[in-house]
Image: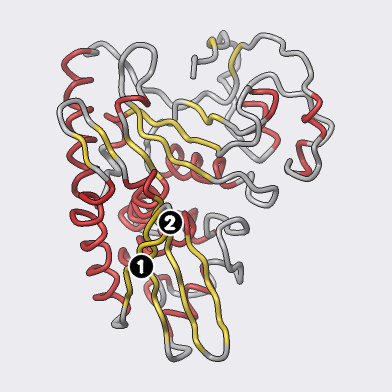
Amino acid sequence: MRLALDDYLDADVAYFAGLIIGRGTISEVSGVRQITIRFTYQSLRAKGISVAFSPDEAIRLGLDSVRERLQELLDTDIQKISKRGGVDLVIRFMRNNMIWRNILLLTDGAMTYPFFKVPRVFFDPELPLDWKREFVRGFADVAGNIRHANRYVDGRHRVRLDVLNYRTNWEVPVQLCTLLQEHLDVPVQLITWGHPNLGRGFREHQLNVFAQPFLKIGFSLEYKQRILEEFADWDAKNCANASYSPCPGERRVGQKSPNPDESNDAKLDPRLLGKHIDSYWQICRELGCTRRPQPGVQLELGPID
């Protein structure tokens, strides 16, 4: 490692980095340095089996705790500003201090989430697992959703981690999936890509993780955590024979007809241009997934989204 990890990173900084990579914007104008974390009402809304939380309740129960944690870490003022469609946490730095420089180091100079990648340090084998979990937890708090409507066809509940769809960040879902499966032992069922040949146009990409395995990560937002635990308990009682395995990297698929938007170079990652896609794992492979089925093992059927 080029730097001692504990010189610029700990569990709280990892959590903060997850928030930034998920929905953060960094700016510096006339000596005023600012980081804005955007919580949309859609991401704040959560509904369980027996309980539901409105955005107003979510703000009261969740965002205040996030704000307090960041204030303790950053020792600076943090404003909570309601805007159309969501709430911003606005953090201002009056000086070019160490935490500001550390964040720029983690984002490799990128300033907003369409250009962010998962920082390389989180794939370092020497990094404590708890710090890696905190990074994913931060991402899930701001960009994850947990709802009864996310359940699979067999009734099991799922957490979805949303990555907004920009030409510059298609590899982020694969990076998150690698971090979850290879480093944190949390199986990802599949990635639902915002790709025109997979029936979703260019909507956001979604990592689907079943509730029970996601308990290893959890949410720091108390109300989301309560719903996660309710879903996991229901699944354990009603789907007791279910198994949870990581995506094998390839599955059997049917052939899909070409879609004219498959060649949309304004929205597709350059690595996908000219490629006909029949299934999610083909995109994963083009964008760097290294998982492959064991030799001689019959390919599984692809899951139904």
Count neighbours of disc 2 (C-alpha within 10 A) and say few if under 14, some if 14 to 19, many if 20 or more: few
The residue sitting at 48% across, 42% down in the picture is: 162
In the rendered image of this protein, does residue 112 appear above or below residue 152? below
Residue 152 image position (x, y, % from top left): 38, 18
Q: Residue furthest front?
A: 84
The residue sitting at 19% across, 49% down in the picture is: 222
In the visual, does 288 lie left or right of 245?
Answer: right
Q: Residue 84 bears which disc, if any?
A: 2
Residue 81 image position (x, y, % from top left): 35, 67
> What is the three-letter code of the residue carrying label 2?
Arg
What residue is shown with label 1? 81
In the visual, does 295 lie left or right of 182?
Answer: right
Front in this rendered view, residue 1 or 237:
237
Front in this rendered view, residue 40 or 268:
40
Residue 43 quadrant: top left
In the visual, does 81 lie left or right of 197?
Answer: left
Residue 218 quadrant: top left
Q: Residue 234 bears which disc, if any?
A: none
Residue 130 image position (x, y, % from top left): 30, 54
Mark 1 and mark 2 residues within 8 Å of each other at the beta carbon: no
The residue sitting at 59% across, 11% down in the picture is: 296
